[in-house]
Amino acid sequence: MYYETDKNDHGLPFNPFKAIVSPRPIGWISTLSKDGIANLAPYSFFNAVGDTPPMVMFSSTGYKDSVANIDETGEFVCNMAGWDLKDQMNTSSASVPRDTSEFELAGLTMAPGRLVKAPRVAHALTALECKHLNTVRMTSLEGEETESYVVFGQVVAVHIDDNIVSNGRVDVTKIKPLARLGYKDYAVIESVFEMGRPAT
Ligand SMILES: Cc1cc2nc3c(=O)[nH]c(=O)nc-3n(C[C@H](O)[C@H](O)[C@H](O)COP(=O)(O)O)c2cc1C
């Protein structure tokens, strides 16, 4: 099969793009509005973009509350959702008014940030406190503004549940991180393998 995206003539019932770019980690983004209302939502257009210093990004299709809060307050937290929090993560993706906190909706406890005012998900096994670098509204090849707003942040503090550290390493199999695939599909990482790079 071959198709060109300006025609999207793949002939499939659903666009396969997100199934191809998978698995995608899920950044479970918590923020505070300027009025102090906590917000939480999952974003799978999410990744690290550098490690010196550590930096992350997520992309919002439309100018959603998470982006608005970050543009206003300059802070956010990326909580990482593992298998045990999958239902709460999903519940927090509901479209609710900006003055409704998804923490409450999903029955999640907030824990305070140390270097940012935004709260984190208390039971998330890892969380990255971030300061906003910039938000880029992407422009297409045709020079048109798209609805993709990409938020970049620098990680200033890291929370790790001590129970997932074994032999000095974060044991990902204890996190069982969720990853987003295409359609309504998810994956969960339960096993890992090691492979060194070729010696130079
Ligand atoms: C697993 C998962 C991943 C998602 N990824 C994205 C994403 O990358 N970009 C996006 O705009 N919406 C994404 N959504 C939908 C948002 O979570 C949803 O629109 C949410 O209401 C946005 O909340 P906010 O307005 O409080 O930021 C995702 C939903 C789920 C369940």
Image (tube, rainbow, N blue to C red):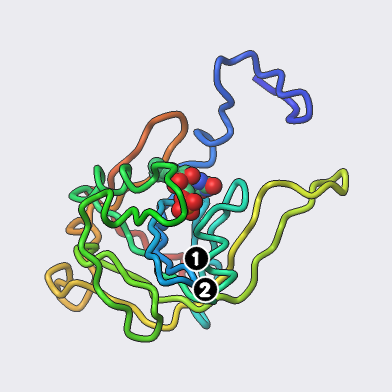
Residue found at the far bottom of this picture: 115
Q: Is mark 2 within 8 Å of ligand 1?
A: no
Is residue 103 positioned above or below 184 on the image? below
Asked whether the beta carbons under mark 1 and mark 2 sit within 8 Å of each other, the answer is yes
Give percent across and percent down for residue 187: 32, 40
Three-letter amino acid code of the residue under disc 1: Ala
**In the image, which disc is placed on residue 55?**
2
Give percent across and percent down for residue 81: 29, 55
Q: Residue at x 18, y 50 (%)?
A: 84
Q: Is residue 28 left or right of residue 145?
A: left
Could you say which is closer to the camera, residue 93 or residue 180?
A: 93
Three-letter amino acid code of the residue under disc 2: Met
Give percent across and percent down for residue 85: 22, 50
**In the image, which disc is placed on residue 48?**
1
Quadrant in the rendering for residue 136: bottom right
Could you say which is closer to the camera, residue 25 or residue 40?
A: 40
Is residue 52 positioned above or below 195 on the image? below
Is residue 32 positioned above or below 192 on the image? below
Q: Is residue 144 left or right of residue 58?
A: right
Q: Residue at x 35, y 37 (%)?
A: 186
